[in-house]
């Protein structure tokens, strides 16, 4: 396929070769310009061979020069794709996966820009990891490129942060077509397994500040990337993969989204909770005990609620179920959380039309089940009295308490936290 930023020359059909082996640069003796070489594995010898050449436009390659170089090497030439009307690029939106990492909290920082001081909310975020996504595709983290093929971010150019990929109407009123911040280019941590970076959300703009507040409150916890695919292969990178492998891709923007297509696209402080849960033996998952006064327990319950409702495609439209959300007060503001998510689900029409995707019956059923299960948790919490216990003078100070339930069979623990099984899409130890 043609690429918008470079001419290409195919030497060998990638379907005849093995895995992707890397890239290199070389200067043409004839044209005195730099071009890139793509290497793939020769299945017969196991060694790397030259599979294709790339001629970046930023290096001054003219179509006639690139075509001549390709002809000299007996390759199949393809000119760079022209830009679309109004300079629009062909950008894909993909909801990326994350892996568990140690909690890193956000912070407010002041920065001087053109002689003026502005405030930003710095939020550590995982942009992607090596994993099969919902489309059965795998994106290679260390295949990321910046600004027309650079291997490292260009310090003179910023990568913008948008809200819902600038899809139109925002949940706060008005439009969200303008950027709400940028990615700190010096914060990129790129490995073969993941890509991490810090988001800098503006606190000087009203809408961006509202988004920043929602992030700090734990309501907006997910994101997705907009990127241009550079090199794709039908050769799987991971076991169980059925779709394409995206070997090289250019990051164009990152967006904060209310409802992601993948339940793993979460902030780092929530991903550690998922990791601890999944690492537990099956016979212990129903007994994940934590003191109800601890901050960890609060975040754990919050992440479960988010994951339960965010387990389907982002464009799903769902009518609000009012049965479990009125005239009640929850210690963790579950009503507000669920109302917020329900509201967003009903107002994703623009994104649905933009992506042109159809929600499957399976995913619709998953969402309904998760929604109903969370409603049962809230209802059970309402009816379950919290047992009294002797407290010290230090403990008598009121604290923000999480949903908790008695479990008589555990003698030394007064509380248990209901847990959500991501595989079966159900809460495990729910009191009926």
Image: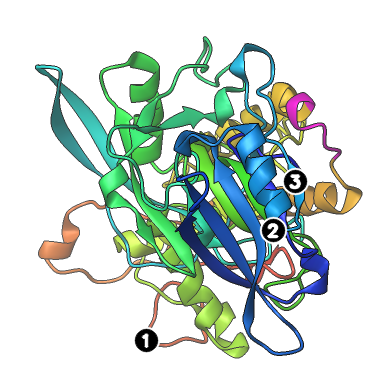
Instruction: Tell me the tag on residue 412.
Output: 1
What is the spatial separation of the Cα atoms under label 2 and label 3, in whole angstroms? 10 Å
The reply to whether the C-beta atoms of the residues labelled 1 and 2 are less than 8 Å apart is no
For image coordinates 33% across by 67% down, the residue present is 102
Q: Is residue 356 inside the magenta stretch?
A: yes
Instruction: Tell me the tag on residue 84.
Output: none
Residue 150 visible? The answer is yes
Which residue in the protein does label 2 denote?
73
- Dot in front, 1 or 3: 3
Q: Position of residue 319 (x, y in %)?
A: 77, 29
Tell me the crowding category of disc 2: few under 14, some 14 to 19, or many 20 or more residues within 10 angstroms, Cα based.
few
Is disc 3 placed on a helix, strand or loop? strand
- Which quarter of the picture shows residue 215? top left
Q: Is residue 361 left or right of residue 208?
A: right
> In the rendered view, would you say 26 is above or below 278?
above
For image coordinates 52% across by 48% down, the residue present is 30
Q: Position of residue 390 (x, y in %)?
A: 24, 71
Q: Is residue 312 left or right of residue 56?
A: right
State the extent of the magenta-drawn residues as a range.
353-358
Which residue in the protein does label 3 denote?
77
> Is residue 57 or residue 168 the one in the foreground?
57
Residue 225 visible? The answer is no
Q: Is residue 109 inside the magenta stretch?
A: no
């Amino acid at each position: 396929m043609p690429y918008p930023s470079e001419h290409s020359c195919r030497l060998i059909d990638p379907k005849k070769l093995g895995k992707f082996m890397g890239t290199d640069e070389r200067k043409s003796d004839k044209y005195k310009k730099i071009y890139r070489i793509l290497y793939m594995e020769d299945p017969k010898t196991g060694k790397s061979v030259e599979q294709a050449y790339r001629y970046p436009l930023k290096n001054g390659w003219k179509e006639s020069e690139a075509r001549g170089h390709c002809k000299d090497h007996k390759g199949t030439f393809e000119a760079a794709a022209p830009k679309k009307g109004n300079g629009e690029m062909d950008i894909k939106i993909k909801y990326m996966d994350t892996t568990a990492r140690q909690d890193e909290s956000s912070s407010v920082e002041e920065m001087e820009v053109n002689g003026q001081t502005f405030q930003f909310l710095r939020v550590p975020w995982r942009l992607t990891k090596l994993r099969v996504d919902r489309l059965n595709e795998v994106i290679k983290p260390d295949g990321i490129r910046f600004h027309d093929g650079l291997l490292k971010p260009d310090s003179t150019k910023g990568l913008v942060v948008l809200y819902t990929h600038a899809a139109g109407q925002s949940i706060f009123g008005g439009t969200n077509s303008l950027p709400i911040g940028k990615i700190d280019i010096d914060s990129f941590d790129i490995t073969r397994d993941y890509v991490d970076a810090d988001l800098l959300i503006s606190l000087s703009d009203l809408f961006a500040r509202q988004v920043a507040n929602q992030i700090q409150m734990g309501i907006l916890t997910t994101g997705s990337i907009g990127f241009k695919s550079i090199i794709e292969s039908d050769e799987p990178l991971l076991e169980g993969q059925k779709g394409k492998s995206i070997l090289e891709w250019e990051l164009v923007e990152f967006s904060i989204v209310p409802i992601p297509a993948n339940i793993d696209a979460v902030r780092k402080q929530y991903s550690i909770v998922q990791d601890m849960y999944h690492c537990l033996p099956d016979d212990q998952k129903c007994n994940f005990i934590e003191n109800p006064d601890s901050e960890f327990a609060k975040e754990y319950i919050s992440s479960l609620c988010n994951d339960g409702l965010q387990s389907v495609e982002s464009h799903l439209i769902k009518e609000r179920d009012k049965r479990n959300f009125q005239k009640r007060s929850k210690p963790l503001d579950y009503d507000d959380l669920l109302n917020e998510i329900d509201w967003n689900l009903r107002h994703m029409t623009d994104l649905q039309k933009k992506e042109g995707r159809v929600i499957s019956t399976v995913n619709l059923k998953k969402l309904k089940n998760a929604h109903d299960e969370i409603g049962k948790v809230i209802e059970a919490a309402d009816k379950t009295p919290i047992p009294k216990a002797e407290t010290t003078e230090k403990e008598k100070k009121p604290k923000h308490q999480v949903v908790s339930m008695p479990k008589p069979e555990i003698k030394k623990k007064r509380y248990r936290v209901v847990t959500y099984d991501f595989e079966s899409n159900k809460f495990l130890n729910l009191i009926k």
